[in-house]
Amino acid sequence: MKLFNVLICFIFFINVLLPLPAVSVSPQTVRIAAFNLYPTIFKAGDGTIQGFYVDFLKEIAKKEGW
């Protein structure tokens, strides 16, 4: 029983004194397939992509933390 307690204390102190480095999460790229279907999504005269679908995806991205 005493050996078991020593082993538990040893494992506890190893975990406290030698913590693992934090795992860094690499950023993910989310790709969306879309086609030109006015007014849901279209390329404006200035070259930007606009429409309901774009606004909808921006809201989802904001809420999901993309």
Image (cartoon, rainbow, N blue to C red):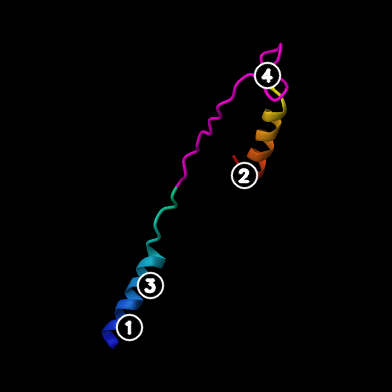
* Element class at badge 2: helix
Frontmost residue, 66 versus 19: 66
Among the two numbered marks 1 and 3 on one chain, the one whose residue lies closer to the N terminus: 1
Residue positioned 50% across, 38% down in the render: 27
State the separation of the CA atoms marked 4 and 3.
Answer: 59 Å
Residue positioned 68% across, 19% down in the render: 42
Among the two numbered marks 2 and 3 on one chain, the one whose residue lies closer to the N terminus: 3
* Element class at badge 4: strand
Instruction: Please give the residue where the numbered disc 1 appears in the rendered image.
Output: 5
Among the two numbered marks 2 and 4 on one chain, the one whose residue lies closer to the N terminus: 4
Q: Residues within 10 Å of mark 4 (few under 14, many from 20)?
A: some
Instruction: Please give the residue where the numbered disc 3 appears in the rendered image.
Output: 12
Magenta-tinted stretch: 24-49
Kind of residue at badge 4: Phe
Return the x and y of residue 5 as percentages of the image width and height: 32, 83
Return the x and y of residue 60 as percentages of the image width and height: 65, 40
Instruction: Please give the residue where the numbered disc 4 appears in the rendered image.
Output: 42
Q: In which quarter of the image is residue 46?
A: top right
Magenta region's main secondary structure? Answer: loop
**Farthest-out residue, left:** 3
Instruction: Please give the residue where the numbered disc 2 appears in the rendered image.
Output: 64
